[in-house]
C-alpha cells in the first residue's frame, strides 16, 4: 500500500523536471506570470479533476478507466495511447539532461560529443527500464529518494546560489523592472514557446493507476495532489528564476538546467571541485523523474489490453505484475528516437520533442476533462468523497476551462518558435509537427478497428496466469 507521503512524492516527481528550467528562464521575470497563469487555467484543473475522478472511480487503470466510464472503450484507448506515446516522444529530452549531468561527474569535456551522448542516453534509459521490471514498490522508493537528493537539493542550491550572486553585487542576466512581469505577446512564436509549459506541468493524473493501492484514499488522494501542486509550482518558478539570474541566455543549452547555474557560479568563485557532486545529484533527479514515468503510462495502456484492444503479447506481466513486453517495446521505440541526436542539434531535438509531447498529452487531457463533465450527468449518484465545488457550474468552469485551454494549446504549439537558441527552420517545423501529430492520432483508431475477438480471451488468459503466479 502507498502512503500519502509516498503518493505525494511520486506525483511531484512526475511533474517536476529540471529540464524545463532553461526554456522558461528565457522569459525572465515574465516566467512567474506564465507559471501562475498556466497553474490557474490548466494545472489546478488537472489536479481537481484527477482528485474527483480518482476517489469517485478508484478503479485500476487511471485515465483509461475514467474515460471508458464516460465515453466508452474506443476513446479510453485513445486517451491511454496519447498518455503513453507522448512520454515516449518526450524521453529524448530528459535523457539529454541525464547524459550532460553524467558527463559533469566523470568527464565534462564529453558533454558536446555525440559519440558519448547517444550511447549514454540509450544506456540510461534501458537501465531505468530494467529497474522498473522489479515492480512499483521498489521504483517508488527509489523515485522518492531521487526526488529529494536529485531535484529538491539541486534546485534549492541553485536558488541559494542565485540569491548569493545578487547579494554579492554580481550583475543579473535578468531584468527586475516591474514591467518585465508582463509577458511578450508580440508574436505567436514567443507565445508558442510559453505553451511548452503544458509539458512541464503535466502528469498529476498518471498515478491514478495506483489509487487503489493508497492507504485511506478518500483523504490521501486529494491531499497528496494539493501538496504536489504547491511543491511543483514553487520549485519550478524558483528554479527557473535561478537560471534566468545567473546564466547568460546567448548560447545556452536547453538541456543543461541547473547545471549551467552550478558551472557559472562555482567557476566564478573558484569552487569547481563541487561540480561533479552536484552533477551527480542532478543525474539522480532526472533518473528518478524518468523512472516513475516509465511505468505509469505503460500501466494505463495495459488496462486497455485487458479489454482486448491491443494484442495479447502486450498483456503479459511478470511476477512483479509489470507489463514486461510493453516496457520492452517502449524501450525499442525510444532507442530509435534517441538516434536523432546523431543528425540533429540537441536544442532542436529537445524543443521538437517537448512540443510533440505537449500536443499529444493535451489530447488526453481534453478527453479527461470532458469525461469529468459527462460523468456528473451520467453517474450523478456515485459517491465522490472529493467533489469539485460549485455543483454543475463548478465542474463546467474547472473542467471546461482546462479543455478549452488544452485545445488552444494544441494549435498554438504548431507555431515555429522565435528564439535564437533554437535553430529551427520554419519551412520544415510545421510539416514535421503536423505529420507526427496526425500519425500519432490515427494509430489508436487503426488498432481499435483491426482488433480481434481472441485478443480479449488473451487478456483473460494473461490474468489467469498472473493469479497462478501470485498463488
Image (cartoon, rainbow, N blue to C red):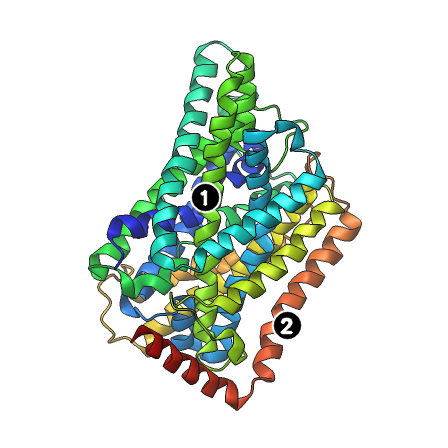
Q: Which mark is in front, 2 or 1?
A: 2
Count of numbered labels shown in the rendering = 2
Which residue is situated farthest in the bottom direction here? Answer: 453
Q: Estimate how packed mark 1 is, as few (under 14), some (14 to 19) or many (20 or more) residues with alpha carbons within 10 Å.
A: few
In terms of depth relative to the viewer, which is nearer, 338 or 435? 338
Which residue sits at x=52%, y=63%?
327
- From where the camera sits, is residue 244 visible? no
Quadrant that contains the C terminus: bottom left
Q: Which residue is mark 1?
A: 37
Please, is residue 12 above or below residue 241 in the view?
below
- In this view of the protein, can residue 165 be seen by the observer? yes
State the image quarter where residue 101 is shown: top right
Q: Residue at x 78, y 52 (%)?
A: 428
| 325 displayed left or right of 439 | left
Q: Secondary structure at mark 1?
A: helix
- Percent across and percent down for residue 29 are 50, 29
Q: Which mark is residue 106?
A: none
Residue at the outermost top position:
169
Q: Which circle marks residue 442 in the picture? A: 2
Looking at the picture, does residue 138 appear above or below residue 274?
Answer: below
Give above or below for 177 relative to 103. above
Relative to 462, 427 lies left or right:
right
CA–CA distance in space, label 2 to label 1: 32 Å
Q: Classify mark 2: helix, strand or loop.
A: helix
Mark 2: give few (<14), some (14-19) or many (20+) Cα within 10 Å.
few
Give how far across and how far down residue 387 sits, in percent: 26, 62
| Residue drawn where x is 28% and y is 60% of the image | 390
Looking at this view, is 193 or 144 the one in front? 144
Give the quarter of the figure containing the N terminus: bottom left
Picture quadrant of residue 466:
bottom left
Amino acid at each position: 500500500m502507498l502512503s500519502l507521503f509516498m503518493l505525494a512524492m511520486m506525483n511531484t516527481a512526475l511533474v517536476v523536471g529540471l529540464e524545463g528550467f532553461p526554456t522558461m528562464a528565457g522569459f525572465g521575470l515574465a516566467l512567474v506570470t506564465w507559471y501562475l497563469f498556466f497553474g490557474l487555467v490548466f494545472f489546478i484543473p488537472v489536479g481537481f479533476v484527477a482528485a474527483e475522478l480518482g476517489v469517485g472511480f478508484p478503479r485500476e487503470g487511471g485515465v483509461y478507466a475514467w474515460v471508458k466510464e464516460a465515453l466508452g472503450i474506443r476513446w479510453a484507448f485513445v486517451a491511454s495511447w496519447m498518455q503513453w506515446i507522448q512520454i515516449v516522444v518526450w524521453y529524448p529530452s530528459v535523457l539529454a539532461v541525464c547524459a550532460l549531468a553524467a558527463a559533469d561527474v566523470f568527464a565534462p569535456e564529453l558533454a558536446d560529443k555525440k559519440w558519448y551522448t547517444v550511447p549514454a542516453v540509450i544506456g540510461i534509459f534501458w537501465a531505468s527500464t530494467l529497474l522498473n521490471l522489479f515492480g512499483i514498490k521498489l521504483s517508488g522508493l527509489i523515485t522518492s529518494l531521487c526526488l529529494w537528493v536529485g531535484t529538491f537539493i539541486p534546485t534549492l542550491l541553485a536558488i541559494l546560489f542565485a540569491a548569493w550572486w545578487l547579494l554579492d553585487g554580481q550583475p543579473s542576466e535578468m531584468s527586475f523592472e516591474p514591467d518585465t512581469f508582463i509577458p511578450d505577446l508580440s508574436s505567436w512564436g514567443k507565445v508558442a514557446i510559453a505553451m511548452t509549459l503544458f509539458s512541464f506541468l503535466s502528469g498529476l493524473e498518471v498515478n491514478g493507476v495506483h489509487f487503489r493501492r493508497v492507504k485511506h484514499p478518500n483523504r490521501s488522494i486529494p491531499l497528496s495532489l494539493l501538496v504536489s501542486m504547491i511543491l511543483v509550482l514553487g520549485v519550478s518558478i524558483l528554479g527557473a528564476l535561478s537560471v534566468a539570474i545567473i546564466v547568460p541566455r546567448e548560447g545556452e543549452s536547453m538541456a543543461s538546467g541547473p547545471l549551467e547555474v552550478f558551472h557559472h557560479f562555482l567557476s566564478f568563485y573558484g569552487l569547481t571541485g563541487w561540480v561533479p557532486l552536484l552533477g551527480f545529484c542532478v543525474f539522480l533527479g532526472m533518473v528518478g523523474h524518468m523512472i516513475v514515468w516509465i511505468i505509469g503510462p505503460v500501466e494505463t495502456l495495459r488496462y486497455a489490453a485487458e479489454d482486448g484492444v491491443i494484442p495479447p503479447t502486450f498483456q503479459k506481466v511478470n511476477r512483479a505484475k509489470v507489463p514486461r513486453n510493453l516496457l520492452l517495446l517502449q524501450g525499442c521505440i525510444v532507442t530509435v528516437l534517441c538516434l536523432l541526436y546523431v543528425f540533429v542539434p540537441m536544442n532542436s531535438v529537445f524543443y521538437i520533442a517537448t512540443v510533440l509531447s505537449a500536443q499529444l498529452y493535451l489530447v488526453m487531457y481534453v478527453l479527461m476533462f470532458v469525461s469529468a463533465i459527462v460523468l456528473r450527468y451520467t453517474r450523478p449518484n456515485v459517491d465522490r468523497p472529493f467533489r469539485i465545488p460549485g455543483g454543475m457550474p463548478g465542474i463546467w468552469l474547472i473542467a471546461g476551462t482546462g479543455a478549452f485551454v488544452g485545445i488552444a494549446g494544441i494549435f498554438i504549439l504548431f507555431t515555429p518558435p522565435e528564439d535564437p537558441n533554437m535553430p529551427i527552420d520554419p519551412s520544415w517545423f510545421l510539416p514535421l509537427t503536423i505529420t507526427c501529430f496526425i500519425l500519432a492520432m490515427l494509430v489508436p483508431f487503426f488498432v481499435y478497428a483491426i482488433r480481434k475477438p481472441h485478443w480479449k480471451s488473451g487478456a483473460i488468459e494473461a490474468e489467469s496466469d498472473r493469479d497462478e503466479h501470485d498463488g
